[in-house]
Image (spheres, coloured by chain):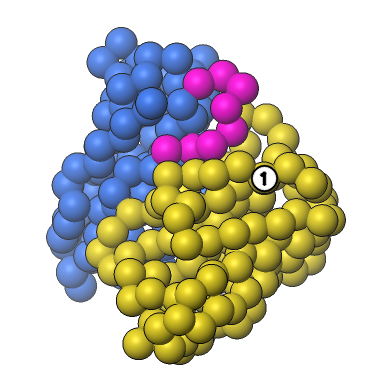
Amino acid sequence: GENVEQHPSTLSVQEGDSAVIKCTYSDSASNYFPWYKQELGKGPQLIIDIRSNVGEKKDQRIAVTLNKTAKHFSLHITETQPEDSAVYFCAANPNFGNEKLTFGTGTRLTIIP
Amino acid sequence: NAGVTQTPKFRILKIGQSMTLQCTQDMNHNYMYWYRQDPGMGLKLIYYSVGAGITDKGEVPNGYNVSRSTTEDFPLRLELAAPSQTSVYFCASSPPGYDYGYTFGSGTRLTVV
């Protein structure tokens, strides 16, 4: 089955700096890669996603890049703000027609004021 | 539009007791999922359903049961609670298809003592 590895497990950055979280996946047939943000005491919330026919997608300060050859995708947050502090999860769809996402183990991002 | 609603938010059970975690969604999503999240860990799939009357096991189904009699509701039943079931439980839903993100509920924090 699909295996998703996420690094780093914790990340601290100064406010205003950029943060990058990377995930690798094992199933070359995977074609959908969402990112979720989980604030303390809340459920994960979808913040951005990318499909396999696209190499990069941006939404204001966040962006996701996908390298299908290397089987990795990354979340980039620019101009970080205190409200970006949260746990971030990547996920991958194992194969076409299988709707169960496989999640990474999460990255706890802390923005230092 | 309430999204995915989970009740209760918190619960303490004694070993051997049983309970049902309720989950309802108002987005007419076909697919629904139950995950557990242990402290500092990622999300593990317990059970999922692709429609009313259809359920299937995920990674960690032992000790749990589900039913799906309507599109809206997907309750999770814990029989004979054990300390290992202490966790935060999240329900999620999604439209049919492999490339749609999940909408998560706010979670139920369960402690078994």
Name the residue: 39% across, 34% down. A64
Can residue A53 be seen here? yes
Side (left or right) of A49 relative to A85: right
Name the residue: 39% across, 70% down. B85
Q: Chain B's colour?
A: yellow
The residue wearing badge 1 is: B55
Q: Position of residue B93 (x, y in %)?
A: 65, 51
Range of the magenta residues?
A95-102
Side (left or right) of B104 relative to A57: right
Snapshot quadrant of residue A56:
top left
SS assignment for the magenta stretch, majority: loop
Q: Position of residue B51 (x, y in %)?
A: 77, 43
Residue A37 higher or lower than A68, as above or below: below
Side (left or right) of B38 relative to A92: left
**Amino acid type, label 1:** Thr
Can residue A84 be seen here? no
For the C terminus of chain B, the quadrant is bottom left
Q: Chain A's colour?
A: blue
Name the residue: 53% across, 61% down. B64
Q: Position of residue B22 (x, y in %)?
A: 67, 72
Residue closest to the eye, A22 or A98: A98
**Extreme residue toward the top, this view:** A69
Name the residue: 67% across, 45% down. B55
Q: Position of residue A87 (x, y in %)?
A: 33, 60
